[in-house]
Image (spheres, rainbow, N blue to C red):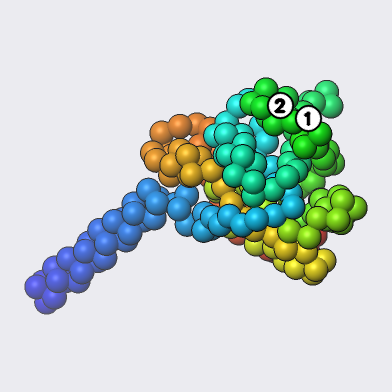
């Protein structure tokens, strides 16, 4: 009887150890689960959706895509922050300083929304107004799966082409010791919440 109990305890202990190992592996590689595959293709416009108030690797990547003649126009997209400040304006200024002609860099201001879906019609409206049939959307890596999927759905319904991509350097940044950096940990946590929460609400689908 005692032997059977000991065997049962060992089985439970082994199961807990295995669960802990799996949980640890998932934790370490969590950002990679949020990242979709990146693709590049010729387009009419680059939709720079990874805009920030400070320079980041996505800016360098957008310039690289432009210089490779993958698109002739760039649209910097962002929601407003405090006091009517839009990171898209800061991003545009950086791109101009990096040599992109002013006439090729546009901005699009979006109103605040809890998720990306409510603002996608505004983006599509601008794309259609300019006669752009193919778009190349640059996102942050951890947003590439959830935002990329919903954006692709809206663009397809509008009869427009869309390719999702992100900066390779940004990918390395967010997947390397993400838990040790507050900004990366916060971005990863927000992406996790969006991935599982957004599909539950009609306005975010």
Please state which of residues 164 and 198 is positioned toward the viewer in this rendering: 164
User: Residue placed at 13% from the left, 75% from the top?
Assistant: 4
Please state which of residues 186 and 84 is positioned toward the viewer in this rendering: 84
User: Residue placed at 86% from the left, 56% from the top?
Assistant: 131
**Kind of element beneath mark 2:** helix
Q: Which of disc 1 and disc 2 is earlier in sequence? A: 2
In which quadrant of the rendered view does residue 48 lie? top right
**Kind of element beneath mark 1:** helix
Q: Residue 189: in sight, yes or no?
A: no
Q: Do tag 2 and tag 1 residues touch (Cβ < 8 Å)?
A: yes
User: Residue placed at 43% from the left, 42% from the top?
Assistant: 172
On screen, 44 above or below 205?
Answer: above
Furthest-right residue in view? 129
- Expressed as whole percent of the image width and height from the top left, the position of residue 84 reads 84, 27
User: Residue placed at 33% from the left, 59% from the top?
Assistant: 22
Which residue position holds label 2? 96
Tell me if 157 is positioned left or right of 23 in this view: right
Q: Residue 131: in sight, yes or no?
A: yes
- Expressed as whole percent of the image width and height from the top left, the position of residue 31 reads 47, 49
- Expressed as whole percent of the image width and height from the top left, the position of residue 98 reads 64, 26
Quick one: label 2, few (<14), some, or many (20+) residues within 10 Å?
A: some
Mark drawn on residue 102: 1
- Expressed as whole percent of the image width and height from the top left, the position of residue 65 reads 60, 44
């Amino acid at each position: 009887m005692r032997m059977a109990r000991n065997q049962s305890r060992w089985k439970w202990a082994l199961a807990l150890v295995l669960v802990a190992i799996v949980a640890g592996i998932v934790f370490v590689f969590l950002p990679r689960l949020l990242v979709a595959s990146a693709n590049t293709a010729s387009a009419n416009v680059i939709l720079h959706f990874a805009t920030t108030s400070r320079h980041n690797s996505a800016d360098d990547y957008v310039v690289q895509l432009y210089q490779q003649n993958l698109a002739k126009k760039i649209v910097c997209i962002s929601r407003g922050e405090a006091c009517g400040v839009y990171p898209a304006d800061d991003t545009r200024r950086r791109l101009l300083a990096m040599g992109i002609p002013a006439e090729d860099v546009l901005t699009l201001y979006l109103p605040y929304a809890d998720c990306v879906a409510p603002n996608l019609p505004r983006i599509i409206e601008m794309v259609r107004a300019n006669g752009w049939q193919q778009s190349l959307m640059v996102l942050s890596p951890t947003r590439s799966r959830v935002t990329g999927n919903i954006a692709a759905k809206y663009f397809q319904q509008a009869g427009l082409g869309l390719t999702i991509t992100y900066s390779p350097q940004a990918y390395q940044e967010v997947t390397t010791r993400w838990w040790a950096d507050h900004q990366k940990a916060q971005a990863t946590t927000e992406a996790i919440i969006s991935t599982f929460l957004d599909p539950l609400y009609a306005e975010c689908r």
